[in-house]
Image (cartoon, rainbow, N blue to C red):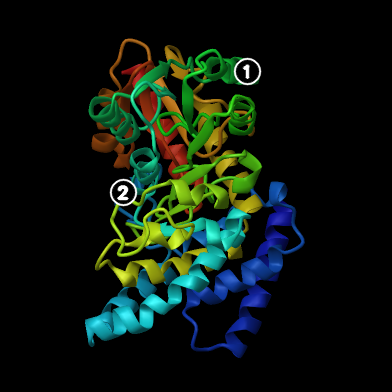
């Protein structure tokens, strides 16, 4: 958008803010301004809004980010917006008034509405969604719960998340299953190549394929549906690690043709730290043993059998509702366009520097917020430390299999000024 449009946006937002203030004087200023900005943006396309800094400034005010640190490691854990933080604190105080009463008889009753709302965002049946603590717990519930036996083969990639790799290795050691590891050359925009790496590994003994929807090391999006279709043709079940994809870019779980899918809600949904979700296709629920025993039939067809965690932090779980409200308020298309724009903004400014290697696709079909940069002849830890020490920028150095670089992950609260500082830091490091 041009400067005139940008100025017009601010003028309209200011007028709307004044109106909102008169009708709701009890709201904090940041909430009133955000309400006005959202009203003003309702007729602006997601693509145009992605570059509208004035709008995203009001989104930024919904977070309590530190002014003394530029956090570009949102790929690890995302901060929650103010409303989610406040809900956690409120529900925690509520729980402590009489824990066994308010936790079990009051807050626990809110799980079914949460389930329905998560299913709405996921695009599936509520009876296919279990609420837990993170994607590792969800995925390992399936990995350890499936009736695999000695000699059964599982296909997975060396670039998958370590917790999952180690879980499969444990089943291999304990039960005698056979792991077949593929090695992906990344980044890639070649769908046929990516699909065929999995297909070539399938045999008559393959029972399960594990696919990471978005590789956490460098943000590579894999063509899950195409791989899943090839697997199902051969009678192979499909488990998808959606830790970094859910609520990050626009898709519905059934679109992936997965049998099992798990996500960490404290990443891109901005839910409280320690909240997650497991999807199991309805007809598959019965065959999977829950990780924690129930007093009932462990092979029943009720998704709730995967939620027997004992005493847990109900105040965290119930605050997921506020995260979903925030997610709906922004809108997944707006979020995706903005995150992709932010990643490409900084990458475009440094990709031509000498010895710089970009380990991430800039195409929206193959990447979104997560970027990874390597510098020839230098260790990832060197750039990571340089950015933190000299510029107070928090990133993370990655050395995993064939991926070597610094992972840089902005978020909806990240400003272009933050990214300009990042570019300055990377440029200084390369020239040092």
Residue at (40% x, 18% y) in the render: 181
Q: Residues within 10 Å of mark 2 (few under 14, many from 20)?
A: few
Badge 2 is on which residue? 69
* Residue that sits furthest to the front in the current view: 297
Q: Nearer the viewer, residue 198 or 82?
A: 198
Does residue 221 appear to the left or right of 317 in the view shown? right
Badge 1 is on which residue? 190
Q: Nearer the viewer, residue 255 or 149?
A: 149
Circle 2 or circle 1, nearest the eye: 1
Q: Is residue 295 above or below residue 47?
A: below
Q: Is residue 39 above or below residue 65?
A: below
Measure the C-alpha gap from mark 2 to mark 1: 37 Å
Q: Is residue 27 above or below residue 55?
A: below
Q: Residues within 10 Å of mark 1 (few under 14, many from 20)?
A: few
Helix, strand or loop for disc 1: loop
Helix, strand or loop for disc 2: loop
Residue 414: tell me if it is visible: no
Residue at (48% x, 14% y) in the render: 185
Among the 4 quarters of the image, the one containing residue 89: bottom left
Residue 220: tell me if it is visible: yes
Residue 381 screen position, x and y as percent: 26, 25
Between discs 2 and 1, the one toward the N terminus: 2
Residue at (48% x, 42% y) in the render: 242
Residue 266 screen position, x and y as percent: 39, 54
Q: Nearer the viewer, residue 302 or 260?
A: 302
Which numbered circle lies on residue 14? none
Residue at (67% x, 76% y) in the render: 16
Q: Nearer the viewer, residue 308 or 196?
A: 308
Does residue 432 appear to the left or right of 269 in the view shown? left
């Amino acid at each position: 958008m041009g400067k005139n449009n940008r100025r017009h946006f601010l003028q309209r937002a200011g007028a709307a803010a004044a109106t909102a203030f008169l009708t709701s004087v009890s709201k904090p200023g940041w909430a009133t301004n955000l309400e006005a900005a959202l009203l003003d943006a309702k007729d602006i396309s997601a693509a145009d809004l992605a570059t509208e800094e004035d709008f995203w400034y009001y989104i930024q005010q919904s977070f309590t980010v530190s002014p003394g640190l530029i956090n570009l490691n949102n790929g690890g854990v995302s901060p929650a917006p103010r409303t989610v933080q406040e809900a956690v604190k409120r529900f925690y105080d509520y729980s402590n008034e009489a824990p066994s009463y308010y936790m079990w008889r009051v807050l626990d009753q809110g799980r079914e509405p949460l389930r329905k709302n998560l299913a709405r965002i996921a695009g599936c049946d509520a009876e296919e969604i279990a609420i837990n603590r993170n994607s590792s717990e969800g995925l390992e519930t399936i990995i350890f719960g499936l009736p695999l036996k000695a000699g059964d083969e599982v296909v997975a990639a060396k670039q998958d998340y370590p917790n999952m790799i180690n879980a499969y290795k444990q089943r291999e050691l304990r039960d005698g299953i056979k792991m077949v590891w593929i090695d992906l050359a990344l980044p890639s925009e070649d769908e046929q190549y990516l699909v065929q790496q999995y297909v070539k590994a399938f045999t008559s003994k393959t029972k399960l394929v594990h696919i990471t929807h978005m590789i956490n090391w460098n943000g590579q999006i894999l063509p899950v549906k195409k791989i899943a279709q090839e697997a199902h043709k051969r009678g192979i079940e499909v488990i998808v690690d959606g830790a970094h994809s859910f609520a990050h870019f626009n898709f519905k779980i059934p679109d992936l043709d997965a049998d099992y899918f798990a996500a960490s809600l404290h990443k891109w949904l901005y839910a409280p730290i320690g909240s997650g979700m497991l999807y199991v296709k309805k007809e598959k629920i019965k065959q999977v043993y829950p990780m924690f025993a129930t007093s009932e039939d462990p092979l029943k067809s009720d998704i709730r059998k995967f939620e027997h965690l004992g005493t847990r932090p109900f105040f965290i779980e119930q605050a997921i509702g506020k995260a979903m409200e925030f997610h709906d308020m922004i809108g997944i298309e707006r979020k995706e366009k903005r995150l992709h724009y932010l990643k490409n903004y900084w990458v475009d400014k440094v990709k031509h520097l000498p010895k710089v290697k970009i380990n991430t696709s800039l195409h929206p079909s193959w990447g979104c917020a997560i970027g990874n940069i390597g510098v020839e002849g230098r260790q990832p830890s060197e750039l990571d430390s340089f950015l933190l020490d000299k510029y107070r920028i928090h990133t993370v150095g990655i050395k995993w299999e064939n991926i070597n670089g610094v992972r840089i992950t902005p978020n909806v609260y990240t400003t272009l000024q933050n990214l300009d500082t990042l570019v300055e830091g990377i440029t200084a490091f390369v020239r040092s």
